[in-house]
Amino acid sequence: MLHIINKSPLTNGALDSCLRVAQSGDILLIEDAVVAATTGNVCAAKLQEAMGRCKVYVLQPDLDARGFGDRLLEGVSSVDYGGFVELTASNKNCQSWL
Amino acid sequence: MKFGIVVNEGPYQHQASDSAYLFAKAAIEKGHEVWRVFFYHDGVNNASKLTEPPQDDRHIVNRWTKLAEEHKVDLVVCVAAALRRGIKEENLAAGFRISGLGQLVEAGVKCDRLVTFGD
Amino acid sequence: MSEVKKFMFVNRKAPYGTIYALESLEVVLITAAFDQDVSLVFLDDGVYQLKKGQQTKGIETKNFSPAYRALDGYDIEKLYVEKESMEARGLSEEDLLVDVTVLSRAEMGELMDQQDVVLSF
């Protein structure tokens, strides 16, 4: 399953909830959630811990828009909107953690 | 692949409609079909033809209209959510149509994937 | 629609503060009317939607919580609550309006994986 997160983990529990429940699959960070995958962010550790069971992706245009284009956390893959589409297609189903 | 998209937030206030549009555009560019976009909750405000953004800003409503015209994307606005928020036939932008929630269920059934954008 | 898919509705928001819970319920009822396989999940603050004793007169808003009791009549019987979400809010099954199945986080994750369509409000 593709899990889509769009909130900063510093102000909202969506990422925490997703990491609590998701046993496997892909996690894509979009919109305000992209900051979770930046170096120095306090949430980086739990994201790295989750990489053992899930693959983590970030939407690069959202990262660039927020000035973090060069601060991507190691182990996280970046995708453009086309990559977002392909992730949705390659997973059997998807869920937006609104 | 056949995609359905759900937009739950209004334009400008939230990035949801922008993300949904860019996703739809990318899907079409990759040869997929965007069969229907369903506007729910405050997302119904994306269909107001009274929308007038500043000249130097993107026109979110017209962008959807153009996508519908060029790629036969079915833009459906939920009737119950629309009436609650003052969206009616008389202020509906081109390319959009007002219909029931059954259209959302139908999109879930007929599309290979249904992707939601919201808050 | 002859085709039947597994639809899951994930409720993670409390009622009244925003309209999501109420409008989500409207989709749930329609989906059941289309004879689809419907599951309702209450996670995080979504658990508050099921709290007994909601009194909305003072905020001049319709109390829609009785509708959860009516779900049975629409053949919607798969209601799931995540254990940790419930306990973190000081709630137990006795505090809830309807009978639910309580799932662990892992069971919840597995159930989500099995769905065809997941709508989150």
Image: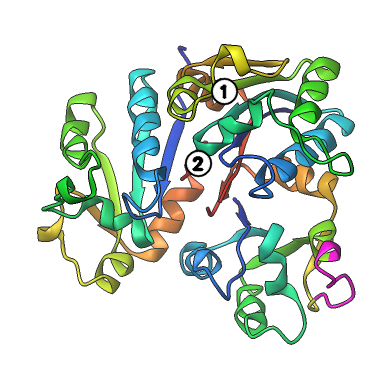
The residue where tag 1 is placed is B77
The residue where tag 2 is placed is C118
Q: Chain of mark 2?
A: C
Residue that appears at 39% across and 36% down: C23
Magenta segment's dominant SS is loop
Q: Position of residue C42 (x, y in %)?
A: 33, 52
Marks 2 and 1 sit apart, C-alpha to C-alpha, by: 20 Å
Q: Check disc 1 and give the amino acid type.
A: Val
In the rendered structure, does residue A82 fall within the stretch colored magenta? no
Q: Is residue B85 above or below residue C60?
A: above
Mark 2: few/some/many CA within 10 Å (<14, 14-19, 20+): many
Would you say residue A24 is visible in this rendering? yes
Quarter of the image holding residue C43?
A: bottom left
Residue that appears at 64% across and 48% down: B13
Respond whether the residues carrying marks 2 and 1 are from the same subunit. no
SS under mark 2: strand
Q: Chain of mark 1?
A: B
SS under mark 1: strand
Which residues are the magenta region? Answer: A64-72
